[in-house]
Image (tube, rainbow, N blue to C red):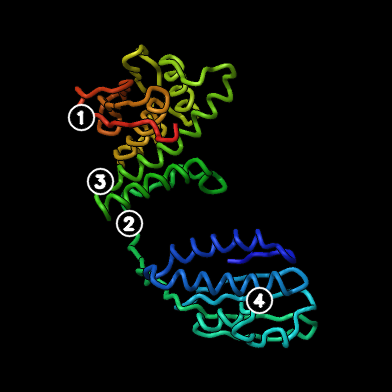
């Protein structure tokens, strides 16, 4: 990780501290030492920003067991005399002393052209990572070679196959429920963006979509990605849709959990507009039905125990 800060950019120093702490939390083996490491990082960066007399370059290298922070000032006013440990009663100038006390190792080197480089190894251990080297599967793997064009596989075939293979991989490793949870989360997030696009393409819509408008939104977003959805019913109680073609093509037969994408996209949009929604996948091409039939119940529906239930986000 690398950051560039202009001379005196204390606001930027605050921002990169948050990014650094987030980075530590993602990779550290526990949280015990993160606060002290963050304090050391802050002192090093602030020392450079306040004393360098020019821009500061900050980098973190964590290829070893512990992160190494380097602060390079690109100015010319920072001299070696400035890094002497201050008197304990001093109000300022204590940054390097604090960092040296918190770090496993701290080095300061004067640059020939002026300025200095401070490097500190922080007392945070990196979480062990499991080596993954799965054997290649050679049967029923996507994309099929017949889909390749003169220049190889095109983007659509590659991305569709990537999604299907990832779903299969999660199912093999963690089970079908885990796959549905992952796919549902993705569908919820993507559905929000698709609803926003629908609204931008239909100026004049009210804050909350009507059932008919919601059905039109579903059809629009599915047609855009190769589905063939159509509205059968749309009233205040429910929206019923049919579908003659899955966007994933025949590949969905190998990963039926991908149907949760449709459920969470439709359910999330409906919940945001009607407070709550329940989606029932009555028929699915993925499990051998000739077409899909999806019913989206609008509002609270306690008498439907086997559907996928969605609630409006708290922010809404």
Q: Tell me the distance, in whole angstroms, between the alpha carbons under discs 1 and 2.
A: 35 Å
Q: Earlier in the sequence, mark 1 or mark 4?
A: 4
Element on which disc 2 rests: loop
Please give the residue where the numbered disc 3 appears in the rendered image: 176
User: Mark 1: which secondary structure?
Assistant: loop
> Would you name the residue on which mark 4 appears?
92
Q: Quadrant of residue 290?
A: top left
Quadrant into which the N terminus falls: bottom right
Residue in front for this viewpoint, 270 or 165: 270
Q: Residues within 10 Å of mark 3 (few under 14, many from 20)?
A: some
- Secondary structure of residue under mark 4: loop
Compare marks 2 and 4 and give the one earlier in the sequence: 4
Q: Mark 4 or mark 3, which is nearer to you?
A: 4
Labelled pair 3, 1 in contact (Cβ < 8 Å): no
Residue 136, image x, y percentages: 35, 60
Q: Nearer the viewer, mark 1 or mark 4?
A: 4
Does residue 193 lie above or below 26 as drawn? above
Q: CA distance from mark 2 to mark 3?
A: 19 Å
Earlier-in-chain disc, 4 versus 3:
4
* Residue corresponding to mark 1: 306
**Image-based side of 276 in relation to 122, left or right:** left
Where residue 298 sits in the image (x, y, percent)? 33, 20
Image location of residue 178, percent across then percent down: 28, 48
Q: Position of residue 67 (x, y in %)?
A: 50, 75
Q: Residue at x 67, y 85 (%)?
A: 83
Mark 3 or mark 1: name the one nearer the start of the chain.
Answer: 3
Q: CA distance from mark 3 to mark 1?
A: 17 Å
Disc 1, disc 4: CB below 8 Å?
no
């Amino acid at each position: 990780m690398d950051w560039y800060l202009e001379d005196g950019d204390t606001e930027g120093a605050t921002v990169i501290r948050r990014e650094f702490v987030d980075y530590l939390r993602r990779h550290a083996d526990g949280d015990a030492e993160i606060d002290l490491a963050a304090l050391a990082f802050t002192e090093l960066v602030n020392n450079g920003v306040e004393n360098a007399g020019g821009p500061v370059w900050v980098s973190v290298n964590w290829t070893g067991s512990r992160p190494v922070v380097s602060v390079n000032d690109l100015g010319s006013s920072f001299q070696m005399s400035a890094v002497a440990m201050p008197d304990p009663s001093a109000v300022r100038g204590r940054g390097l002393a604090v960092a040296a006390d918190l770090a496993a190792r701290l080095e300061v080197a004067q640059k020939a052209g002026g300025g200095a480089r401070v490097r500190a190894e922080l007392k945070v251990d990196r979480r062990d990572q499991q080596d993954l080297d799965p054997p290649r599967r050679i049967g029923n793997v996507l994309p099929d070679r017949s889909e390749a064009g003169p220049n190889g596989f095109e983007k659509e075939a590659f991305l569709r196959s990537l999604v299907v293979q990832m779903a299969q991989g999660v199912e093999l490793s963690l089970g079908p429920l885990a796959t549905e949870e992952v796919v549902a989360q993705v569908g919820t997030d993507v559905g929000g963006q698709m609803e926003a696009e629908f609204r931008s393409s239909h100026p004049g819509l009210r804050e909350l979509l009507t059932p008919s408008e919601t059905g039109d939104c579903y059809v629009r977003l599915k047609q855009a990605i190769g589905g063939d959805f159509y509205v059968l019913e749309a009233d205040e109680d429910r929206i019923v849709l049919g579908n003659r073609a899955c966007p994933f093509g025949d590949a969905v037969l190998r990963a039926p959990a991908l149907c949760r994408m449709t459920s969470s996209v439709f359910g999330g949009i409906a919940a945001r507009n009607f407070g709550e929604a329940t989606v029932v996948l009555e028929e699915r091409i993925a499990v051998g039905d000739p077409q899909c039939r999806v019913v989206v119940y609008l509002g609270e529906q306690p008498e439907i125990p086997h559907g996928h239930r969605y609630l409006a986000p708290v922010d809404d």
